[in-house]
Amino acid sequence: MKATLSLVVSAAVTFASNPAFAQERANELLGGRPPPTGTGMLVTGSIMTGVGAVNLLTSPLCKTSMVPRDTQDVCLGTSLVLGGVLTAVGVPLLLVGVSRHNDYVEWKRQHRALAALTEVGITPTAGGAALTWNASF
């Protein structure tokens, strides 16, 4: 068990080395690397907040005749805890996602030429895949 633990620690030190940080810093200074878009956090936060809110809003149903009497308290407690945790995690994800997305939009506005290159994507087609590029004039 100790050998496995030391292996994990040494791997973490290897991945967090200084040369990688120096490369990232150089790319940031040149404006070549766009900031994160925040889309993943926005999607995850929206889903978690939505499911949590629905759980919280429907928790009073646990005290109705739809749920057997012997499980009503467990149902209510579970709904409140699960809904609260999902909402408590989802709302900060939404806030950070909005902040990151705003930073990305600002970066795109300041670096129009580089931003045009970030609009390249891959789309599945019937025969395989196609390279796409979005641009507005």
Image (cartoon, rainbow, N blue to C red):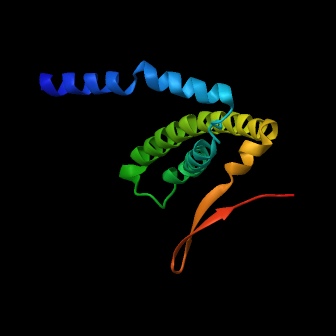
On the rendered image, what quadrant is the C terminus found in? bottom right
Q: Residue at x 61, y 59 (%)?
A: 121
* Image quadrant assignment for residue 106: top right
Q: Residue at x 44, y 58 (%)?
A: 67
Could you tell whether 33 is left or right of 83 in the image? right
| Residue placed most toward the observer, 119 or 60 | 119
- Above or below: residue 131 compared with residue 103: below
Residue 15 percent coordinates (x, y): 37, 28
Number of numbered labels in the structure image: 0
Of all residues shown, which one is farthest toward the top? 18
Could you tell whether 107 is left or right of 34 in the image? right
Of all residues shown, which one is farthest toward the bottom? 126
Residue 59 percent coordinates (x, y): 54, 48
- Above or below: residue 28 compared with residue 112: above
Q: Residue at x 59, y 42 (%)?
A: 41
On the rendered image, what quadrant is the N terminus found in? top left
Residue 98 percent coordinates (x, y): 70, 38
Q: Residue at x 50, y 50 (%)?
A: 63
| Residue placed most toward the observer, 77 or 3 | 3
* Image quadrant assignment for residue 125: bottom right
Residue 116 percent coordinates (x, y): 74, 50
